[in-house]
Amino acid sequence: MGTKLCNLNIYNPEKKPYELEAGYSVVHIADGWDTILEDEMVLNYNKMARIARRLSKELDSPAITVNYFDDDVFMLDIYKDGKKAAYHVVKYDKYFSKKIPIIIDALRLDDKDAKIFKHIMRNEKEPPKAIDKLSAICGIPFYVDMMILKETKGPFIPDKATVIEEIKSKKINYKNKSQKAELLKEFPGAVVKYYTIPSNSDNYTGIIRTVEPDEDELDYEKVHCYQVADGQVPTLKKVYDFIIPFHEYTKKPKDTNVCTMMHGSYDCGSLHLTEPPFWGLYMTSDRDTIKKIFSPGIIPEENLSNSTYCFPDKKSIVDDKRLLQEPNKELLESVDKEGKYAHYYFRGIKKIDDVIVRVSEYSESSIGKFQIYARFDFWKDNLEYIETVLVPITMDLGFIYFRSDFTYIKEKQEIVYGHCIFYLKEKTVGKNLQFAEKNTFIDKRTINGKNYLIVGTSKYIHIYDYDLNLLKAYSLFGKYIEWFYDDEDNMYVITSSMIHGTESRGMNAKDKVRMYKIELSKL
């Protein structure tokens, strides 16, 4: 469980008087701003919003509310003239924004700060980091409640210069080492991540589902299915079309942006249809209804074929249910014997070469003692346990919030995770600023007898050697959907401008699905 808080800030340099309900107090942290806090941690977000509506009209000044929940959700809402006028929401590694110019104006940002603020809005998808960085740039306390105010010394606004310097340090200059990836194909549309009922077609690689613009109307219920087809150059072969009857249940038009979420398993869970960012449209736990909605999406197996291409992300999948949470008997006995409390926070698991690596945050606590570790458990690919390595870390590393892939370099006994390098022999951790803090994937590949790391970030495919030197960068556009290799060491990447059904807007005519080629053999 993480921090929960809510607060309100309103610009009131002339100290205009106003009344507050019992249970709320005004404090002054930022020059010219009133910060309104709950006297006790009631967390009545709706009441704070009502106060914001009233004061924005009464004082003729925008009111800014913050709702922060469990380090998972950060909501920044702007109220003007008694109405909600704009918002920025960060949750579960996604963000949703509406009326950004109103946000910038309400926070009284100049052009320089507005540019940095918008950069953070677009790129910071972790609530703890987003709330701190945005607070620093606008100079307003977002991460504060009455308990934090009374029990900590502050500062209650993070250092602006530190945040700006961190952003600058991550803008690596790839000018001399980058080139554009070769664009093989593109077509209008966007990949869609609608829920699909488990079926045998899930065992095939290279399948993407899209929604595409139509001359007559915009219909998000029409879904087109493609599979990567073998050839001298891979192509996307259409293998199936189907329609999902959302409007029958949501009673909304066919151009409504719908997100499908299955809470629990198909056998016993519930289906939720929502309109991003979080508006509920329909919910059911009835198996027959769920089957009726999603069974049209099962691609007939006879339409699919087995690919000769290598899809590494599929090969790395591991069924972690067959692995013990605590495979290390000595460690387990030590915890029991010394009366410690052990806590595990799973971060990821994958098969790398001939071993399975599981990553988690692990902590041990007893009276007067607390230590956290980056934990790495190793098994052979036949599930025979090898060892556990604990690397001591500190809270400020933010290990629990890492949103990146990882890999294991056996030859050097190193784990590369985001931009951090965990040295397993020394049991220490360092950072490599040539690496982006976030990535979608890290692949290991041997090309012309040399070993390389292939790292996919938001705008580039980066190529590193095992000494972690950046050798080459290939620019491309869109979000990664599939990536794969042929026998001649060519890499192919399928991207989509956006992922329909997961973002605050739906697909539009400007969105594209693209396939790129990168000739790694020329490294």
Image: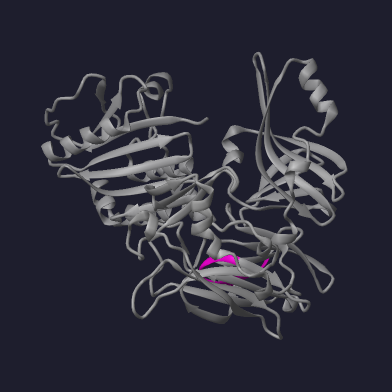
Residue 71 lies left or right of residue 364; in this view the side is left
Residue 99 lies left or right of residue 474; in this view the side is left
**Would you say the magenta stretch is mainly helix, strand or loop?**
strand
Q: Is residue 325 above or below residue 410?
A: above
Region rendered in magenta: 471-481
The quadrant where residue 354 appears: bottom right
Task: Give the residue at the far bottom of this rendering.
Answer: 232
Magenta run includes residue 270 = no
Q: Position of residue 96 (x, y in %)?
A: 39, 52
Residue drawn at x 43%, y 46% as measured from the top left: 283
Residue drawn at x 77%, y 53% as measured from the top left: 351
User: Residue 440 or 252: which is nearer the viewer?
Assistant: 252
Residue drawn at x 27%, y 56% as measured from the top left: 101
Magenta run includes residue 480 = yes
User: Residue 520 or 303: which is nearer the viewer?
Assistant: 303
Q: Position of residue 128 (x, y in %)?
A: 47, 39
Q: Position of residue 228 (x, y in %)?
A: 65, 75
Does residue 443 appear anywhere in the picture?
no
Rendered image coloring scheme = one colour
Q: Quadrant of the C terminus?
A: bottom right
The quadrant where residue 514 appears: bottom right
Q: Position of residue 220 (x, y in %)?
A: 41, 67
Q: Is residue 219 above or below residue 359?
A: below
Q: How many marks?
A: 0
User: Residue 92 or 409: which is nearer the viewer?
Assistant: 92
Q: Is residue 123 above or below residue 484?
A: above
User: Residue 270 or 376: which is nearer the viewer?
Assistant: 270
Does residue 339 appear anywhere in the picture?
yes
